[in-house]
Amino acid sequence: MSEVDKSYELKVLKMVANKYLDETISATERSLRSLEANPDQVVWELATRIYSQSGYKVELGILRDVVNSRIEFVKYQLASEKERMAEEARRVAEEARRVTELKAAEAASLRDEMRDEIISIMGEIGVDERQANIFVKLRKIISEQLDVNESEVTLDSNISTDLNADGLEAVELAMALEEEFEIEIPEDVLGTEYRGNPFCSSISSSNNSVAVSRTVRELFIFIQDKVSP
C-alpha cells in the first residue's frame, strides 16, 4: 500500500471514529470524566463498530490517538465555556454596579435639587422646612392632576378660576391629596358646586359643575394643620 493510500485510509478511519464520538460524547463534565476513566473501553467500542460495519481491523493505537485528541478537545470546550460564563458574570456584575452607582448619583442629585427647592420655598413664602415640604408635594399633585405647569401653582392661585379645575377634577384632586397626605378633605374645602339647577340631567350637571372656589393657600393651610408633625 502506497503512502498516499495509507494517508487516505488513516483520514477515513479518523473521520469514522470522530463521527462515532460526536454521536456518543457530549461536551460535559460528566462525559469527560467517563471518557478519561474508560478510554480503552471507548477504543474497543470504536474498533468493534468499524469491524462490524466494514470487516476492517483497525490498529488500536490509531483509535487511541483519536480518543485522546477528543479528551483534550472536550477539556478545551469546557474551559472555554467556563471562561465565557465567568466573563459574562463579570459583565453582568459590572453593569449592575454601574447602574447602582448611576441610580445613587441620580438620587443624590435629586435630593440636592429637592433640598435647594425646599430652601428656596422657605425663603419665598416664609415657611419652615416641614411646611415647605408639604407645599412642594401639594404643588406637584396640583400640577399633575390639573395638567398645569408647577410655575403656575402659587399660594394665591385659585383652583377654580386660575387653574380652571372643573367639578370632577376637583374631586380627583381631593382624592389624590387624601392619598398622599393620609387625610380626609371635606367637599366644602375641595369639592364640587353647580352653576344653574343641580337637579337637571346628569350630562348638564357634569357640564355645569365647577370646583369650589378655593386658593392654593387655603388648601395648604388646611393640609398642614391636618398632617401630623
Image (cartoon, rainbow, N blue to C red):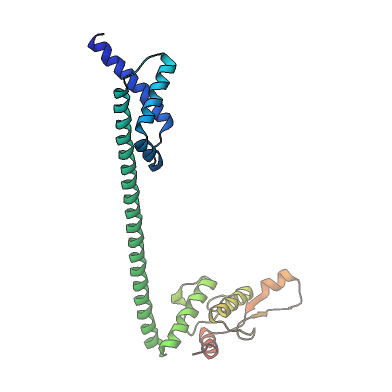
Q: Nearer the viewer, residue 43 or 185?
A: 43
Image quarter where the N terminus lies is top left
Residue 130 rendering spot, x and y as whole percentages: 44, 87
Q: Quadrant of residue 12?
A: top left
Task: Kindly identify the residue that appears in the image at 62 percent across and 76 percent down.
Answer: 171
Q: Nearer the viewer, residue 51 or 191?
A: 51
Rendered location of residue 227, percent (x, y): 53, 87
Question: How many tags in the picture?
Answer: 0
Residue 25 image offset from top left, x and y in percent: 40, 33
- The part of the image, by quadrant, that contains residue 106 is bottom left
Residue 142 horizontal/vertical position (percent): 52, 76
Left or right: 193 in relation to 94: right
Query: Which residue is at 32% across, 35% downward?
Result: 71
Q: Residue at x 50, y 80 (%)?
A: 138
The residue furthest left is: 3
Residue 200 vertical placement versus 52 (above, below): below
Name the residue: 45% across, 75% down.
Answer: 150
Quarter assignment of residue 56: top left
Q: Is 205 placed above or below 71 here? A: below
- Residue 95 lies, with reference to residue 142, above or below; the image says above
Q: Is residue 15 left or right of residue 24?
A: left
